[in-house]
Image (cartoon, rainbow, N blue to C red):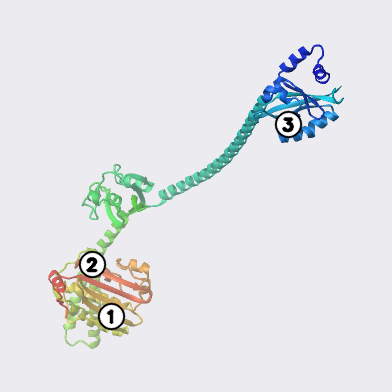
């Protein structure tokens, strides 16, 4: 470079040919500048990079080869460094080519103490290194670093997301474990409850397949017959213990069909083997979104109860039959005694009391026999129901007067019905007697008789003590008496309404009622019209007059 400076400053010297060869063949570009940046010399390498001719570069200024930003950096950094330190190293800059493209370069410079021959000032030697590949490498490196940073950020985000998901999974696992523990606890509780209750439980799906049973049901099956299973063929009989139920009548098939029923009495097992069991069966369908998905069937073993009721009825019938014979004899002798002439009034009165109480006792015995037999013999024929009701009102009037009860009658002159007059008179007497009895503090009993297009209706309403909802559920139970009736000392044994209901239903009718505590009760008898009368009613001809 010393030779080059001399050649540039002082003119050609010995060995200039070698200098020129090495100066222009160098791999980097070289510039020889005055201290104000004027280009004294430039090698061909630099000229080829920039696309300028060497002759065109000489005499120009290095600042003219740079964009504005690099001009500022060169004048504010490189020039002061050369003036103060005498050199600068690897200043990144760009040179503007003849085509206007920017060529990335690295500039390093040193100030020589040798003087320029023209003005005696020093000269600056500038080495120019083409940084295009380095710039490309740096850009690729920066891009790679950015990608690496993005990948690291993505990895960190993925790790954080994984940690969050792991935490969520751990929380879900904790919740699932807690729910599983609760489910097991509930399952154990349900199993304990199901195996503790004293009724058999059977759950079937929509096809009748067994889904769940309890220990009580399995024990009941085993007691009857080991091959009797809830879902298979089995001997099932009706309430009479001998009539087999058809498949469609069996409780399971009815339940699978979606039926809901309660208190159906059936017998399981064979009567010949002596191991029949009476079961009270109820079923409720399982509905999911309106679709029947199965059914729950409950079996209650009522064998002892059925046998006890049968024994009770047999006992009542036996006792009633044994009482009836001596009562008939007693009443006959009382009639004979009353026929005797010359009896004192005191004796006559005593005999009448005895006869009246004997008749009452005989009526009670007859009621017991009627209830025990469960069958009511009917002698049905066209009768004037209005006349029967009026006779009942006349019969109960003395008792109503004694109890300060007003009787209000709404009875047509005549109303024909197809009925047993004696049994229907018993119905009227029972209803009127109850209405008066259960009005112990006075009140009003209203009797209405009429008919519509479908039935003859008799209603008896009172303003007496009434019944609670719990009492209404048992009103047709044998020997049941309401608590208010017992507390009010109302006489009776709790058979009147049972007998009345049996008589009405034997006529093909219905006995219904409404009641409210402290407000009274209303009982209504509905008897179907005979076909000829129904036809006349439909034609607008009423038999009621």
Q: Nearer the viewer, residue 329 or 528?
A: 528
Q: Answer with left or right where residue 436 lies relative to residue 424.
A: right
Crowding at mark 2 (Cα within 10 Å: few <14, some 14-19, many 20+): many
Residue corresponding to mark 1 = 446
Earlier-in-chain disc, 3 versus 2: 3
Q: Residue 402 location, x and y as percent? A: 30, 84
Q: Residue 244 location, x and y as percent? A: 22, 50
Crowding at mark 3 (Cα within 10 Å: few <14, some 14-19, many 20+): some
Residue that appears at 24% across and 70% down: 500
Q: Label 3, label 2: how many angstroms apart (C-alpha)?
A: 130 Å
Q: Answer with left or right where residue 210 lies relative to residue 196.
A: left
Q: Secondary structure at mark 1?
A: strand
Up-down: is 266 above or below 47?
below
Q: Residue 369 location, x and y as percent? A: 22, 67
Q: Label 1, label 2: how many angstroms apart (C-alpha)?
A: 23 Å
Residue 351 can be seen in this image: no
- What mark, if any, has residue 502 been given in the picture? 2
Q: Secondary structure at mark 3?
A: helix
Q: Quadrant of residue 403?
A: bottom left
Q: Answer with left or right where residue 142 lies relative to residue 233.
A: right
Q: Secondary structure at mark 2?
A: helix
Residue corresponding to mark 3 = 64
Q: Which quadrant is the N terminus positioned in? A: top right
Q: Nearer the viewer, mark 3 or mark 2?
A: 3
Up-down: is 407 above or below 236?
below
Q: Label 3, label 1: how many angstroms apart (C-alpha)?
A: 130 Å
């Amino acid at each position: 470079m010393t030779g080059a400076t001399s050649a540039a400053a002082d003119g050609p010297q010995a060995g200039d040919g070698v200098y020129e060869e090495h100066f222009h063949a160098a791999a980097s570009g070289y510039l020889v500048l005055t201290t104000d940046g004027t280009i004294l010399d430039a090698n061909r390498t630099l000229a080829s990079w920039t696309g300028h001719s060497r002759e065109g570069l000489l005499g120009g200024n290095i600042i003219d080869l740079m964009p504005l930003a690099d001009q500022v950096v060169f004048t504010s950094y490189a020039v002061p460094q050369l003036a103060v330190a005498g050199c600068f190293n690897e200043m990144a800059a760009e040179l503007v080519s003849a085509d206007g493209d920017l060529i990335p370069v690295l500039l390093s410079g040193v100030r020589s103490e040798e003087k320029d021959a023209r003005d005696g000032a020093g000269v600056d030697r500038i080495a120019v290194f083409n940084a295009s590949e380095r710039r490309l490498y740096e850009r690729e490196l920066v891009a790679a670093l950015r990608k690496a940073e993005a990948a690291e950020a993505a990895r960190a985000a993925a790790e954080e997301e994984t940690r969050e998901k792991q935490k969520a999974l751990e929380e879900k696992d904790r919740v699932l474990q807690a729910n599983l523990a609760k489910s097991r606890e509930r399952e154990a509780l349900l199993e304990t409850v199901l195996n503790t209750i004293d009724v058999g439980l059977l759950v079937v799906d929509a096809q009748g397949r067994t889904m769940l049973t309890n220990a009580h049901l399995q024990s009941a099956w085993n007691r009857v017959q080991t091959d009797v299973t809830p879902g298979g063929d089995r001997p099932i009989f009706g309430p009479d213990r001998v009539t087999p139920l058809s498949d469609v009548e069996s409780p399971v098939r009815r339940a699978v069909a979606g039926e809901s029923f309660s208190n159906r009495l059936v017998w399981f097992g064979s009567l010949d083997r002596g191991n029949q069991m009476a079961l009270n069966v109820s079923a409720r369908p399982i509905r999911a979104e309106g679709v029947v998905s199965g059914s729950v069937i409950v079996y209650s073993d009522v064998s002892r109860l059925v046998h006890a009721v049968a024994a009770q009825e047999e006992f009542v019938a036996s006792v009633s039959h044994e009482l009836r014979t001596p009562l008939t004899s007693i009443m006959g002798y009382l009639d004979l005694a009353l026929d005797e002439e010359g009896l004192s009034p005191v004796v006559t009165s005593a005999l009448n009391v005895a006869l009246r109480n004997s008749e009452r006792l005989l009526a009670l015995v007859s009621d017991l026999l009627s209830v025990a037999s469960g069958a009511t013999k009917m002698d049905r024929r066209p009768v004037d129901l209005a006349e029967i009701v009026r006779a009942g009102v006349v019969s109960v009037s003395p008792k109503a007067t004694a109890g300060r009860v007003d009787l209000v009658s709404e009875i047509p002159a005549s109303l024909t019905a197809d009925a047993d007059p004696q049994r229907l008179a018993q119905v009227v007497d029972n209803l009127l007697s109850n209405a008066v009895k259960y009005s112990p503090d006075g009140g009003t009993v209203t009797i209405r008789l009429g008919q519509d297009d479908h039935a003859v209706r008799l209603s008896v309403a009172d303003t007496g003590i009434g019944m609670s909802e719990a009492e209404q559920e048992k009103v047709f139970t044998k020997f049941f008496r309401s608590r208010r009736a017992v507390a009010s000392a109302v006489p009776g044994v709790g058979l009147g309404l049972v007998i009345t209901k049996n008589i009405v239903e034997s006529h093909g009718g219905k006995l219904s009622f409404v009641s409210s505590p402290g407000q009274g009760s209303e009982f209504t008898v509905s008897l179907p019209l005979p076909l000829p009368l129904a036809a006349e009613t439909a034609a607008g001809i009423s038999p009621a007059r």
